[in-house]
């Protein structure tokens, strides 16, 4: 099977994937096209497309990183293409996968015991259990390494967790949440698999969002939540381990930003070819072509950058600043691109019916989560200069 090249993939870079990879991407693309018609309405009502949980698991893209759940051995670059493909149709769907497969499964895959991996990864991969990743707090976002206040206190073979979390994706309906908490004895950040039906755990949906409205973000309170020692992630002994999980998924958010940009660009191109003003299609006006070409420049520059970041990861040669530069650059350019795509549609750019407005709104959240532009810029700045300018 040879994939048809997206209009937004100017150099047909996706065609370099193997036949096996192209087949899986092709199945994913067909599945996403089948759900696309329902998405605008769900975005408007801020409801989650529940059918995608089993649908995406059946396609086989949940848990591509782990031998327990991957249909075949694959690369970070391939997983990037999967993120792009998801976000090209919808960034909320890409975010669900980022949380379920990237952050929740990633924390267990990277920091879990063999028993935890064997138990949880297949359940999460099949979508039989839903995961969330609770790091951010009401009073601590960008400064999570220093400012995280949720506490964990060892009591015999148990831990007692107290604190609050904010913005936690999937958390209104997840079965487990990976909770990051500071051990009061050694002051180190540790990770716990917290079943969400544990007494003292409460998740409340964050309402009135203007971006990624289908993603179910929650405020969580943890009041004397007791978990057994065998639900602590043994490989998470300090914030450096939390950061390693985030590093692995950050590049995938950069790929998602490229996907959302492509989705907006392709809708704008179609519109420009069909809408007639001054007796000819918008696409035949020089200034509209200028916008389309700027979109294409942004997408192509971002795509080649995120691909290089993932190739570094595949070569085992990735540093924090590689993923950070990819994320900061791709999300900044995505913001420009969706704004230009929206401009091409005039007034119709701000209504959901024409295929651009949803991307325009959703890119705002991609810009801020998994490290804001400023924080990723500071990571790169530190690498360039040898000077840390965070505080
Ligand atoms: P703040 O840290 O308060 O920052 C506010 C502004 O100040 C930003 O522009 C920031 O860049 C800037 N700033 C902060 N410090 C500095 C500095 N030193 N120098 C310069 N500028 C600075 N978290 C989870 O744990 N799990 C999730 O599943 C999750 N999902 C999310 C989904 C969505 C839709 C959103 C919006 C957020 C999600 N988050 C999640 C949280 C996300 O990671 C944080 O929003 C992000 O880290 C920024 O933290 P903050 O919002 O508290 O902003």
Image (tube, rainbow, N blue to C red):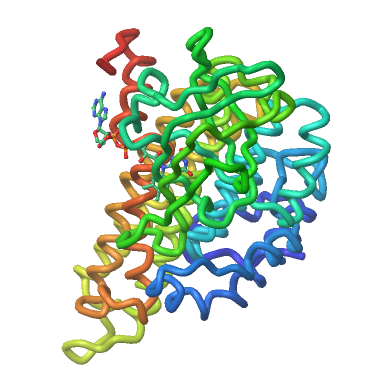
How many numbered marks, from 0 up? 0
Q: Residue placed at 28% from the left, 84% from the top?
A: 281
Quadrant for the N terminus, please: bottom right
Q: Residue furthest left?
A: 278
Q: Position of residue 54 (x, y in %)?
A: 71, 64
> Looking at the image, which residue is at 57% across and 26% down?
160
In this view, the residue in front, 123 or 348, is: 123
Q: Residue at x 26, y 15 (%)?
A: 389
Quadrant of the image occupied by residue 105: top right
Above/below status of 244 relative to 85: above
Query: Of 281 and 363, which appears nearest the observer?
Result: 363
Where residue 208 appears, as percent x and y from the top left, is 30, 62
Q: Is any part of residue 109 visible from this angle?
A: yes
- In this rendering, the answer to whether 41 lies above or below 55 is below
**Rendering quarter of residue 212:** bottom left
> Looking at the image, in which quadrant does ligand 1 appear?
top left
Res 361 seen here:
no
Q: Position of residue 117 (x, y in %)?
A: 78, 34
Q: Quadrant of the C terminus?
A: top left
Provide residue 82's location: percent of width, then percent of height.
Answer: 61, 53
Residue occupying the far bottom of the picture: 279
Compare residues 54 and 156 and report the one nearer the observer: 156
Left or right: 130 as drawn, with respect to 165: right
Residue occupying the point 51% across, 66% down: 48
């Amino acid at each position: 099977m040879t994939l048809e090249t997206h209009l937004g993939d100017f150099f047909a870079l996706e065609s370099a994937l193997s036949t096996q990879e192209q087949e899986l991407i092709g199945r994913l693309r067909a599945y996403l096209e089948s759900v696309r018609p329902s998405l605008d309405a769900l975005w408007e009502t801020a409801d989650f497309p529940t059918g995608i949980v089993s649908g995406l698991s059946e396609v086989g893209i949940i848990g591509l990183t782990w031998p327990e759940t991957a249909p075949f051995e694959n690369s970070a670059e391939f997983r990037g293409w999967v993120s792009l493909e998801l976000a090209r149709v919808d960034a909320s769907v890409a975010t669900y996968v980022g949380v379920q497969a990237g952050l929740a499964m990633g924390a267990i895959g990277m920091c879990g015991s063999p028993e935890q991996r064997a138990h949880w990864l297949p359940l999460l991969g099949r979508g039989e259990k839903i995961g969330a990743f609770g790091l951010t707090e009401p009073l601590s976002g960008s400064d999570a390494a220093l400012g995280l206040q949720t506490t964990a206190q060892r009591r015999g073979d148990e831990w007692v967790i107290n604190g609050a979390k904010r913005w936690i994706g999937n958390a209104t309906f997840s079965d487990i949440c990976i909770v990051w908490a500071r051990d009061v004895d050694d002051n180190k950040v540790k990770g716990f698999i917290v079943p969400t039906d544990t007494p003292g755990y409460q998740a409340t949906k964050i309402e009135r969002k203007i971006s990624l409205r289908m993603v179910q973000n929650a405020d969580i309170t943890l009041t004397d939540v007791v978990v057994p020692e065998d639900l602590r992630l043994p490989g998470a002994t300090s914030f450096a381990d939390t950061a390693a999980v985030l590093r692995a998924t950050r590049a995938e958010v950069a790929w998602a930003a490229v996907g959302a940009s492509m989705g907006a660009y392709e809708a704008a191109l179609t519109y420009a070819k069909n809408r007639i003003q001054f007796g000819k299609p918008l696409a035949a006006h020089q200034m509209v072509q200028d916008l389309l070409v700027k979109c294409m420049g942004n997408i192509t520059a971002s795509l080649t950058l995120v691909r290089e970041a993932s190739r570094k990861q595949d070569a085992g040669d990735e540093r924090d600043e590689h993923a950070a530069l990819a994320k900061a650059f791709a999300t900044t350019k995505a913001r420009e691109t969706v704004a230009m795509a929206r401009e091409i549609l005039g007034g119709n750019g701000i209504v959901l019916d024409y295929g651009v407005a949803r991307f325009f709104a959703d890119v705002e959240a991609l810009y801020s989560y998994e490290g804001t532009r400023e924080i990723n810029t500071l990571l790169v700045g530190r690498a360039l200069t040898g000077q840390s300018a965070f505080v």
